[in-house]
Amino acid sequence: PATIHRQDYRPPAYWVHSVDLHFALHPTETVVRARLGLRRNGGPAPLELDGEALTLLDASIDGVAVEPARLQHLPGGGLRIDDLPAECVLETRVRISPEANTELSGLYLSGGNYFTQCEAEGFRRITYFPDRPDVMSRYTVTIEADRASCPVLLSNGNPAGHGELPGGRHWAKWEDPHPKPSYLFALVAGDLVAVRDRFTTQSGREVALAIYVRDGDQDACGHAMDSLKASMRWDEEEYGLEYDLDVFNIAAVSDFNMGAMENKGLNVFNTKYILARPETATDGDYEGIETVVAHEYFHNWTGNRVTCRDWFQLSLKEGLTVFRDQHFSEAMGSAAVKRLANVRRLRAAQFPEDAGPMAHPVRPDSYVEINNFYTATVYQKGSEVVRMMRALIGPEAFRRGMDLYIQRHDNQAVTIEDFVAAMQDASGTDLSRFARWYAQAGTPELHVTEDFDAASGRYTLSLAQRTPPTPGQPHKQPVPIPVAMGLLGAGGGALPLRLRGENAADAPAERVLLLEEARQDFVFEGLPERPTPSLLRGFSAPVKLSGLGQDSLGLLAAHDSDPFVAWESGQQYATAAMLRMVAQGGEPVLGEGLAAIAAAALDRADSDPAFAAEAFALPSESFVADQMPVADPEAIHAVRQSLRRQLGIRFAPRLAELHDRLADPGPYRIDGPSIGRRALRNAALSVLSMAPGGDGLRRARAQYAAGGNMTDVLAALRVLVDSDDPARLDALADFHARWRHDPLVLDKWFTLQATSSRPDTLATVQVLALHPDFDIRNPNRVRALVGAFAAGNPAQFHAASGEGYRFLAEMVIALDPVNAQVAARVVSPLTDWKRQAEPRAAIMRAELERILARPGLSKGTFEKVSKGLA
Ligand code: B3K
Ligand code: ZN
């Protein structure tokens, strides 16, 4: 397969100013007629149209049928036509089979209903088209279908008519007044019901809101609708950005390759990010809905009105929109805890990516399959880069920069440079060096050394940075790193921050140092005692920090005023302790320092239970493994489990008391304090149940039996499924029997077992892959079992036998011909062999080779596996 390079970008030979589509829907023989208004862009050149899995019926130019010989079929399935006039209308008719479309890209069927997914390159599976984001067109869409099976007919934009047809068929017409790239096209048709609401924009436009779901799910849309209205309001208040159509529709589908899609005026959502009832959805699900609904809504401006010139610019819309949804979610709840969770996710997904075979810059330089680049780097690191930019220029300048960006580029397809230029022009700050964050892959390492001269009260903080080499980028330049910081005295109080040469009178307690060179010294004066530095407050830059000793980390964990640093220092302390235990072997011992950090976390149970839950948790096994040049998954697992057991023994009375006291006082509520309370209570239960002879398992059985909300039920079942308690099998059977008709809940049943810490998990997973409820065509189910096991259960996935690797390889081989996008995603853990010891590494390589040898392997899986072997 060919590699596409960013430097090879060329403007299109033709613009398509207007698109008129007509769909005659049929499960196996849908006919799509497309009328494209073409205008040449520059001198004479052939027209090249993308196409994939299309059967061409006929074509005409300005109403005159085209001789078949004039249509040159291109290798990938596209079409080429020479000698077209500078302006003309090209009409094609193609036949497609939604039923045969298991890739879920293009037009497909899910539960008998029609849905589309066009980003990144799905539109070419619907009709012949220059399927690239810089071709922006005005769309008119007419859909014709059987009225009984397809009462609902939706597309982008505003409704523009509907009517009856002979033979029990009907039609509806949609017009989208805003020019858009083909990846934002959407069609939804079928037997769905609408949950409706209204929104009045700040300028008085009335918007009809609707969420379309399957009959029976109407009661599960409230949180999504509330989140939508809150997002619409927030974008007006924070950015002055108002919605721009008469309707905003969302349709939920249970077969979907990712979370959701921001199609103009017609978002399509994985049901996972729409449907929630207290008894079926966890607090995490509720939070996910709020975030994803906001994210897709915010794309209306950052992505849709201003879009990407080419797919290398993907972070232009994704990094920026993740930044916007995180900022929104922080504003909606406990900002500090939301920040911790986002940092935790960044480090769980993006740091390993940056250190692995697929490492790429936020703005990649090349790709084989663009769908492989919807990554944590493009999304989460991209968001961190925007966040740093805002911190550097300040919130007011950032807002002016956003205004300028949108004013300059509305209805355009632009680049990351255009975004940075708007921020630079609005702020007057030179951002040319900062732009390296977009170009360089790899996580910068920030190392701190200190020197204190007691006689003069002078403290020198030396910060050094280094970014390790990544594939294709052996040498790195320094990047500007904003380091938000403070200094603490031995008692934990803040010390004044007076840099050499500054006035003593107005020394602040917190400031941002900017590390621009490979190494810089920052000299503070007037310090009464040796300080402890609190660095990267709020995680001010996506870097790895090293150089602080356990004493400093302990002090910061106990006293720092910044919740991120307090949490992070505890995590770093625990990580260092766990790494030492892994290296030493023997029976791990819960030291006094670790116990003190846990105790300090529990002390915050009343003031901030959500924070207490985060701070009480030990770092994940993957996080610890990521700190080792060669990981030892089984040893890490053993150490972590042993420490949890010792915490359970040591804090048993306190944990039991928390579990009693933090029970929901009334009906389920989805607000910050309630979520925090449940999180801490269930964290207490989980650790308590590790203590042998304690009553944790009894509590878990009772909590499961009590039913109630899914957060508590699942937490209790989690404890049982990890245990030897004989009740666990009954509980699992009971859960299955109760929820077998609710796919999203059944996904949890699969995931719970796939991520169990029990030693027989691999065998269970192999059996579950044969379970009648396992369906390889449903991405949620594949992620729930295969993805959860391979990415979320390192100790079992890396079982010394290699059976975990073999299982994943077999699933990938079975999945690739069905749904290549999902196959290419779940294969990732197998490419991490460089950080495993022999013989594991050799088995992983052999499994990768086995996948690579499959005839007809998709280019996406090929790219992941071949890069993974390199
Ligand atoms: N833009 C889509 C993702 C499309 C993924 C294509 N493989 C959802 C989002 O980021 O909002
Ligand atoms: Zn997005």
Image (spheres, rainbow, N blue to C red):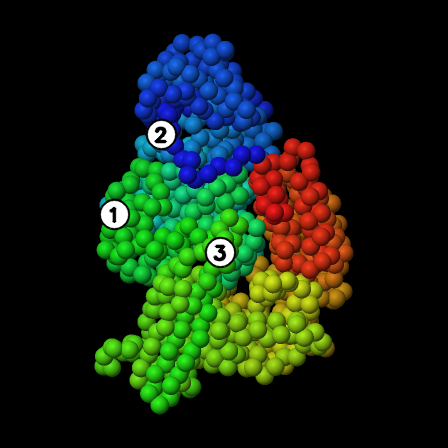
What amino acid is labelled 2 in the image?
Ser
In the image, farthest residue toward the front: 475
Looking at the rendering, which quadrant does residue 688 occupy?
Answer: bottom right
**Callouts 1 and 2 close, C-beta under 8 Å:** no
Q: Residues within 10 Å of mark 3 (few under 14, many from 20)?
A: many
Return the mark for residue 404.
1
Q: Secondary structure at mark 2?
A: strand
Report which residue position mark 2 lands on.
137
Residue at the image position 50 percent from the left and 59 percent from the top: 468
- Secondary element under disc 1, as helix, strand or loop, is helix
The numbered disc on residue 442 is 3
Q: Amino acid at mark 1?
A: Leu
Element type at mark 3: loop
Nearer to the camera, 433 or 749 = 433
Indicate the quadrant containing the N terminus: top left, top right, bottom left or bottom right: top right
User: Viewer-proximal residue, 541 or 179?
Assistant: 541
Residue at 39% across, 83% down: 452
Of the numbered discs 1 and 3, the one sitting upstream in the chain is 1
Q: Earlier in the sequence, mark 3 or mark 2?
A: 2
Q: CA distance from mark 1 to mark 3?
A: 31 Å
Q: Where residue 630 sits: x, y (%)?
A: 64, 62
* Whole-percent x, y for residue 478 in the image: 40, 60
Q: Are marks 1 and 3 in contact (CB under 8 Å)?
A: no
Spatial CA span between label 1 and label 2: 24 Å
Q: Please tell me whether residue 203 is drawn above or below residue 569 in the rendered image.
A: above
